[in-house]
Amino acid sequence: MSAKRQKSDKKPGKKSSKNSDKNAKKDAKKDSKRKAEKTTSKKAEKKTAKKPDVKAKKRKERKPEERRTPEPRPEVRTPRHTTAKRIESYHAQCKRSVPMKPRSIPPAVKPAQRSTYFDLEPQKGPRVRQRVGFRSAVIAIVAVIAFAAVAYGIFNVFRTVSNNGGETSAQTSGSQAAAAPSSPDAPDTSAKGSGDIVIGVNGDEDTYVLKDEKYLEAGAHASEPEDGILNDKIKCDGSVDTSVVGEYRITYRVKDSQEHEARATRNVHVVDSMDTMKEGVPILMYHYIYSQDDPPQDSQAENEESNYLPDTKLEEQLKYLHDNDYYYPSYPEVKAFIEGTHSLPKKSVVMTFDDGEKGFLDIGIPLLEKYKVPATSFIIASDSDAEQKVVDHSSPYVSFQSHSYDMHKAGGNVGHNGIISALEKDQIVEDLKHAQEILGTTEAFAYPFGDVTDAGRDAVREAGILCGFTTKNDWAYKNDDTTALPRVRISDKTSIDSFKYVVNES
């Protein structure tokens, strides 16, 4: 070994110089690497090193009396559901560098509400404001539509009144009906003029029909001060299907020569079932109405068969009918009921007043209008003022029918010796048709004095009259002769209890 070393020392050569250069380079690289590592470690130490808390140091240096305890931070609670913008706003307010993690959503929360939520104060976000704005817009639109509807309705009312010039309905038709005096003694001071048309339906304005029975059209009546009776000018609109249960409306329209128009309405109720009259119907017969304060001086007023009735008793009877919802059938209904082809509602009654006497016209009609009870007034058509009576005392609740033209006088030999028993059928027919031309109605006829003959019955049929009435004191029963039906006499001797008994079917 020593020999080799000596040899090598003595002969270094080129190879030894090369190895020393390599070693020097390696050492240089290691030194630079160490320096880089030291630099990196120093930077890391600087990053991780905690900065001195200057504020804490100052607080420690303060004297105990100068120190202050920090105020507790208020607990802030917010709704569970909020948007990301609200969360960011909260972070900005609290100056937090790290956002809070959302809590897990409880299963009770609805799917539509499953968003991140924090305990923040409730604030109205964009969606809430949108919902409030939408509600306000809807409310505003509804208010505008309602206002427009009200304005349109008011405009139509004024237009209808101005166009019709006194148009009336079945319930308040005519200036008399609308302004009927509350007391029968109070005079009717309303003056009728052009365009004051009075129109009303015949029979009950609320008509009831059983399903599958035939609806019987009864028509209407109307008059105007200058044009007179307008019955032949009335037009009817509407139809009724009795195979289908329901409510139907029939409208009657009439115009005068000045193109003023009036209307009346009938409400038809088709029903599956109802309580009906079983055997017959009461047709009541009245004659003379007088004021209790001005009784008649006629000796007949004391008679058991007196035709006189005070206004107080008439009003008591009408009030009873009104309060107990009686039904007032038309003459087509009465005829069909007597013949067995039609049903009448329970509590049906027919009201008739003979002779067109002044007391009835002045006192009775206002009472009928007050209680809305339809009735018939049988007029003697040969009276010089017969047609004028109809016009002057026109009412939506009174139909003026024939008491003959010129047969209300003596000259016969039957019953009360009325002249009808001395006339032939053709003469009677001629009389009846003449009366119809004056009065404009053909539905009913009351025999003068109640005298009936075979020729008279045949004449009633030939003249197209639906029902003829006598003075026989009784109900009209099924299968009676419709050309000569009996009636129940009502007089001063009829008490209210007797009246109730008469109008109710036992």
Image: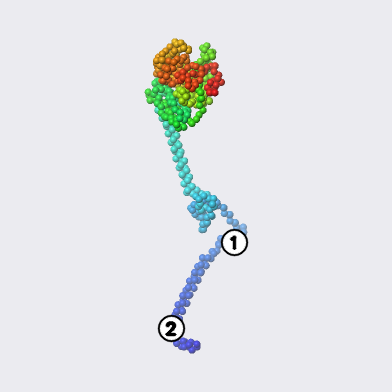
Q: Nearer the viewer, residue 48 or 303?
A: 303
In this view, the residue in front, 302 or 97, is 302
User: Is residue 25 visible to the viewer in this orientation of the structure?
Assistant: yes
Q: Residues within 10 Å of mark 2 (few under 14, many from 20)?
A: few
Disc number placed over residue 119 in the picture, else none = none
What residue sits 48% from the left and 45% below the top? 132
Quarter of image, res 404: top left
Q: Earlier in the sequence, mark 2 or mark 1?
A: 2
Q: Which corner quadrant holds the C terminus?
A: top right
Q: Is 464 situated above or below 71?
A: above
Q: Position of residue 28 (x, y in %)?
A: 46, 76
Residue plotted at (52% across, 22% down): 503
User: In front: mark 2 or mark 1?
Assistant: 2
* Camera-side residue of 368 and 273: 273
Question: Looking at the image, which residue sits at the far right?
Answer: 64
Residues under labels 2 and 1: Cα distance?
Answer: 71 Å
Q: Position of residue 471 (x, y in %)?
A: 49, 16
Q: Which residue is mark 2?
A: 15
Residue under label 1, please give it: 60
Badge 1 density bin: few <14, some 14–19, many ≥20, Cα 10 Å = few
Q: Secondary structure at mark 2?
A: helix
x, y percentage for residue 406?
42, 14
Residue ranking furthest to the bottom:
3
Q: Is residue 185 visible?
A: no
Q: Amino acid at mark 1?
A: Lys
Q: Position of residue 313 (x, y in %)?
A: 53, 19
Label 2 is placed on what type of residue? Answer: Lys
Q: How is the image coloured?
A: rainbow
Q: Secondary structure at mark 1?
A: helix
Disc 2 vs disc 1: Cβ atoms closer than 8 Å? Answer: no
Q: Residue at x 40, y 16 (%)?
A: 429
